[in-house]
Image (tube, grey):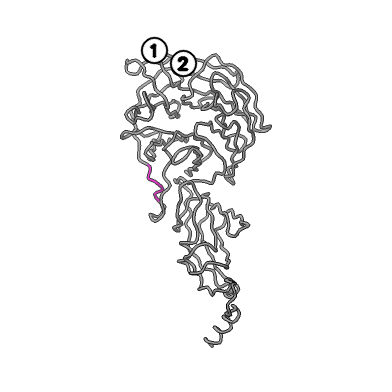
Amino acid sequence: MRWSALLLVLTGCNLFGTDDESCTPLPPTTPEDLWSIPWVELNVPQGFCNVAAAYQFQIYTFGSHPVLVDDVDGFGGEMTFPPGSQVTTLSGGGAEVILGAASGEVCGRHHNDCTPPGELACQPLTVVAHDVFTATRNDLLLYQGGALAYANGAVWDLQPRYHDGVWRMDPETLVWEQVLDTFPEGTPGGGDFSSGDAIVVGTDIWYVANGRAFRFDTAARTWTGGTPLADAWSQNASSVVHNGRLYIQNAEIPTSGTGVGLFTFDPVTVTSAIVSIVPQAGATLLNRQNTVAFARGDKLVFGGGNECDERNIGCWKQDFRIFDPATGAYAVAPFRMPGFRSIRGAIDFDDRTILFGQDSTAWLLRDDAADFVALPRNPVLASCTPRVPPPGALHQSTVVYGDRAVIVGGEGADNFVTLYLR
């Protein structure tokens, strides 16, 4: 029986010297094969290791990996994925997959003219859907320094830098589309109004930069602007929204006197106003650029930043000041960023803030706590997979919606896009 069956298989494979490679007998697919078949298409390559983050983009394919057979020509196969995964079949074979939040199995089998499809071989796949950073696919060039906002059920990236325009991300599919390729003022591609600040009112996003206020209508996808403001601030400013106003920490605070370093923008009246700064601990204010800002209860926090060449780590500061909008008073914050690092960004949830350092570290500061706590790098991901670090190599833009945050910029490249699942 064994020899008879083998003869039938081999006869069907044209043993008499044709160039047809499609009939090389294949061994059965095993669960171990599934460790090597898939790979992840990310800005930072990442392997497959039974554990993945929800909404992580991957490409799975048969037919091009030598782990299955010595001769990889001429075979096909299929794979299945956990419930909730978004699977798009590729014209050349294989599939694009965005993993959902449900754990399950990845299964697959290979076959050709000589090897009928056998049983599916499966590997368990644990999907992590909380307290994890996951890189997402991004086919567009999103530059660091834009203003992110969440409005009208989507994430918007306003980018009047190099490539003027607006990009939109669908929060369900994580697909980006460019919805506009112009900006109302300035030299096209010149970045005259880059690195601005944004505040959302209804379905409108107000974008303020270089002494002008521009309104972007997310429903009509059109710009209106720009309205001149009484005040201007540098492109290295940081901002936080409080009670319907945008509080903007200027990046070029005078080095003597009380100075003027904090502005407010009111999108209802489309006006700006000045907030006087009391020198910290009686000392004169220093020129502080690239600060970060976040809310802490009913108060606002500004800190970090550099006071000389941003390329020199010695110029970066770890301290913070707390501003009370009700009294207009500043106080020195009791907390400092641990160690010595540049602080590159912050994602501000209602009761906590996560700050990023240039060394790809992330630090958690709860509103009811006095100190930073180091946030482990994807603590639940298996060690055999290179970990996706919290992005921190470049200055980044962040936006929070619900229990998620989108981060543009960071580790590796301007257009590194990361999703944080709280």
Residue indicated by mark 1 = 258
Q: Quadrant of residue 60?
A: bottom right
Residue 368 visible: yes
Neighbourhood count class around disc 2 (C-alpha, 10 Å): few under 14, some 14–19, many 20 upward: some
From the top left corner, tell me how far across and down residue 406 is, in percent: 51, 39
Residue segment shown in magenta: 375-379
**Residue closer to the observer: 265 or 213:** 213
Q: Amino acid at mark 2?
A: Val
Q: Crowding at label 1, few (<14), some or many (≥20) Cα neighbours within 10 Å? A: some
Evaluate if marks 1 and 2 touch, with contact meaning CB atoms under 8 Å apart. no
Q: Position of residue 23 (x, y in %)?
A: 58, 74
- Residue 6 belongs to magenta span: no
Q: Quadrant of residue 327?
A: top left
Q: Earlier in the sequence, mark 1 or mark 2?
A: 1
Number of numbered discs on residues = 2
Indicate whether residue 376 is drawn in magenta: yes
Residue depicted at 55% across the width and 52% down the height: 98
Q: Which residue lies most toward the right here?
A: 220
- Secondary structure under tag 2 reads strand
Quadrant, the N terminus: bottom right
Q: Which residue is mark 2?
A: 275
In the image, taking residue 214 as reference, residue 326 lies left or right, namely: left
For badge 1, the amino acid type reads Thr
